Image: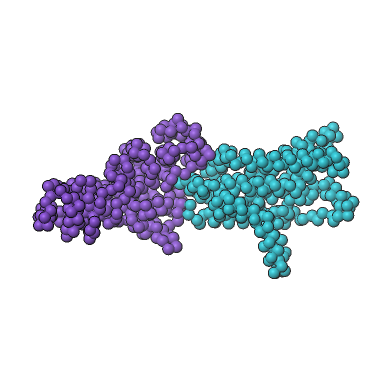
Amino acid sequence: MIGAAFRSEMRKAWKRPATWVTLGLFGLITFADLFDEFREARKDSEDPFFLPEAWSQILGEEVVIGFIFTSVLVILLVAAEFSWRTARQNVIDGLSKSQWYSAKVLLLPLLTALFLGLRVFVGGSVALAGTDLSNGATLFGTAQISALGGMLLTGVGYASLALFAAVAIRSSGPAMAVWFAWFAFGEGLLVGGLGSLFEGLRPILRWAPIMTFNRLRDYVQYDPDALRRAAEWAAQHDRPVPALEALGPAIAGSVLWIAALTLAGWLWFHRRDL
Amino acid sequence: MTSTPDDPIIQTFGLSKRYRKTTAVDEISFRVETGQVFGFLGPNGAGKTTTIGLLLGIIMPTGGRFELFGGSSAADLHAARQRIGATLETPNFYPYLSGRDNLRIVANVKRRDSAEIERVLDLVGLGRRAKQKFKAYSLGMKQRLALAATMLGDPELVILDEPANGLDPEGMREIREIIRGLGERGKTIFLSSHLLSEVERTCTHVAIIQNGKIVRQDSVTDVTAHGVAGLRAPDLEALATAVAQYPAARWARQRGDRVVAELEDGDMAALNEWLGRRGIHVFHLALEARSLEDVFMEATGATRMDEPADGSSSPSGPAEHRLGEVP
């Protein structure tokens, strides 16, 4: 039955204009961002934009934009089910509450992969234009696969926070506002405030959800060549060498937060009337 | 598992739903058997929708319990709901999807094929408009789509909450025909409505709920079996006032060109004599069939409920006279 529910989710998402609007907008922003990188690279030989080196920019800091779009789409797809009362009707039609919720949870990695994939496709296509294919270099290897895995987990983390906001608040606008406030400054304020009040809590507060997910977001963690280049650049420009996070605890922390957020969302959803 | 007549399909035992300060459903117990067209009657806010929500598992009860198809465990209830087609309040669909695509979502959950989608679309007369988006549908079309979704999967129990809401008289008639057709095919129907004439025309059994409590339940034939007195006099207002003051009158009210009243003793001759002594001379006095509205009045002591402007009764409603009231 979860399979049937998930197929329904796919159909709903596919036919929903919001899906194509968010994907289109993200595609345009990504193209503009990476094309700009490509143009700059042609002027500045120190900062090349061709494969495989360009992966550090394609999967760099701006990947977070994709996670924001994913989260916005998750909220739009889930919260609307409460305003249209279709969540209630789905349950009346024969889905159990757990099946309904599980289908939504299954959407999270799918949507994250969709936005991440779009960035990889757009970025890869732009970078390919400047790549010399005759030198036989590996354009996409284990480093990129590992980076995509880590970033997929980061994105699912962001999206699970969005799912929690959507089922707890049940209205798209307010849920987006709460999600964005938490992402942009809420967590920082809370961690900073609590950290200054209780110094002993600081090591724990560093594991707040967004901070935990972001530990997996640094591309150089996955690519030794990119790390070497970043270290060389830092030495040349008298900057600190990038500090690497231990991946194991970051992955475990992210998985735990994703589990906690989806479970909290489930409990919230299950205990309230539809 | 199939149901046979007299098997209770729905049975509630002191079912309750309390919110912080409000009791929406107050220890109600009723029983719906196989093949019944069961009218669940009550004014707006009486607790009809909450009761249905409890049965459908979208509202958690705060007291009592219920059985569907004889089962009451969570697994039983989930399995039982696969045998139910239901709509609650307004038709709830995805506005950006077409009528057909919306039914595909329902059919996917109910594991039905596309041929059945076309069958139910034709049944409710939406076959030609199935490509149109739900948000572009009129209220009548939305109600029909909800009815089509309800019938997908050929459910044994159909639960309809105010299916005639917002429909014009023709739409109401069509919905009534569809419901009647379902009843004739042996489906058990649980029909919630605040439209008395709709329930009277459609249902075999009825329960009246008011302020969250069941105040009357029986077959429609039984609840309307006892007649009421129908009277006419030159001065209808004076007649209504006088009858309302008659000691043996449970209730009395003006209905069209006459006054109807229920008498505790059924003694119309005594009423006639009592009126004569007060100078009111009736020129018509007869035993009339009691309507469901009369039953409702008796059971709840309520004011007149909303009636459809379909010619079945006057929307503005005649003057009402209850015991102890002088109009």
Q: Is residue A49 left or right of residue A156?
A: right
Q: Is residue A44 visible?
A: yes
Q: Is residue A102 left or right of residue B219?
A: right
Residue B71 drawn at (x, y percent): 40, 51
Q: Quadrant of the C terminus of chain B?
A: bottom left
Q: Position of residue B157 (x, y in %)?
A: 38, 44
Q: Nearer the viewer, residue B43 or B284?
A: B284
Asked whether A55 or A245 is in front, the reply is: A55
Q: Is residue A105 visible?
A: no
Chain letter for the part of the structure drawn in purple: B
Q: Residue furthest right?
A: A236
Q: Quadrant of residue B145?
A: top left
- Quarter of the image where the N terminus of chain B is located: top left
For image coordinates 79% across by 55% down, the residue present is A244
Rendered shade, chain A: cyan
* Residue drawn at x 56%, y 55% as measured from the top left: A168
Whether residue A203 is situated above or below residue A226 in the rendered picture:
below
* Horizontal side, residue A270 vs residue B296: left or right: right
The residue shown at (68%, 45%) is: A66
* Residue located 28% across and 48% down the image: B317
- Considering depth in this image, is B317 or A176 the residue closer to the camera? B317
Indicate how the structure is coloured in the image. by chain
Residue B283, horizontal then vertical, whole percent: 12, 47
**Residue A70 x/y as whole percent:** 64, 46
